[in-house]
Amino acid sequence: EPREWLHDGRRIDLLFTALSFLAVAGYYGEAAKATFIKDDSDETVSLRSPHIRWLLKLVEAFSPAINKLDELPERAVLLFGFDPSAAIRSPENAEVMRSPGTAAVLAAFAARVLTQAVPLTSERFKAMMKDVQKETGVKGKELYHPVRLMLTGAHSGPEFDKLIPLMEEGSKLQLPLHILSVRDRVEAFEQERAAAANDVSRPEGNDQHGKD
């Protein structure tokens, strides 16, 4: 079996540093360090480990938005700490949620994801978004911001072609905090969106018991 190696001491140090910060935040366990195969003679790290390949993708996806690696856990919370209820009810996301095309975009995207029998790929995601655009007539940020909110809880973050693999591959890894797949995120978001809609539609003071 061919062995794949990372022959870059600086990149290895970066991975260990990133792993340490993620471990402190509770996102990555110390046991994950065992997935590194390190040889002091030539400073190599095996890329055969799914954890290492995923960690590399994580650092590369979020590095444009951070100045120092200690900022990584805060940025990566959209993967590890996805909270659809908070996202839907957050004042920061109110403009996106109230946008005229948001409901149609979310419904169209959810319908496509929930009929997928296999994990979503970046290529399939792009095709889905084209279909959603054709169906809804919504484009640009009005199209992508609601979907980003549905998948991450925020309306900004790494590019989708990097996020989708992180979600799908991360959901298969044994981590202290489970990473939800795209499908799981969509299901959770739609449940919370329905609950929020019921809260809004419920008349205030509908419990008249004890009143004159």
Image: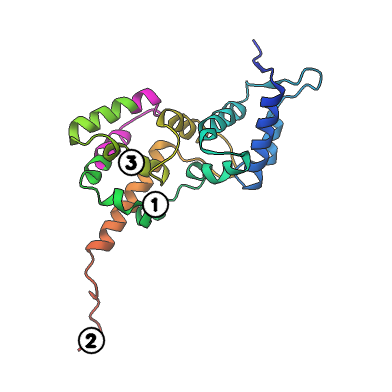
User: Which residues, given as a range, are shown in magenta?
Assistant: 107-125
Residue wearing tag 3 = 145
Q: CA distance from mark 3 to mark 2?
A: 45 Å
| 86 vs 187: above or below | below
**Which residue does the image show at 28% across and 33% down from the upper left?**
112
Up/down of 173 relative to 200, above or below: above
> What residue appears at the point 28 percent right and 42 percent down from the top-left corner?
106
Q: Which residue is mark 1?
A: 87
For the N terminus, give its image quadrant.
top right
Quadrant assignment for the C terminus: bottom left
C-beta proximity under 8 Å, tags 1 and 3: no
Compared across the picture, whether 38 is left or right of 108 comes to right
Label 3: which secondary element: helix
Is residue 114 shown in magenta? yes
Whichever of labels 1 and 3 marks the residue nearer the N terminus, that label is 1
Spatial CA span between label 1 and label 2: 36 Å
Residue that carries the numbered disc 2 in the rendered image: 211
Classify residue 36 by image quadrant. top right
| Frontmost residue, 21 versus 70 | 70
Taking the image as shown, residue 32 lies to the left or right of residue 178, namely right
Asked whether residue 172 is in view, the answer is no
Question: The residue under label 2 is which amino acid type?
Answer: Lys
Q: Position of residue 62 (x, y in %)?
A: 52, 35
Question: Along the polypeptide, which appears first: circle 3 or circle 2?
Answer: 3
Q: Amino acid at mark 3?
A: His
Q: Residue furthest right?
A: 41
- Report helix, strand or loop for mark 2: loop
Q: In this view of the protein, can residue 82 be seen by the observer?
A: yes
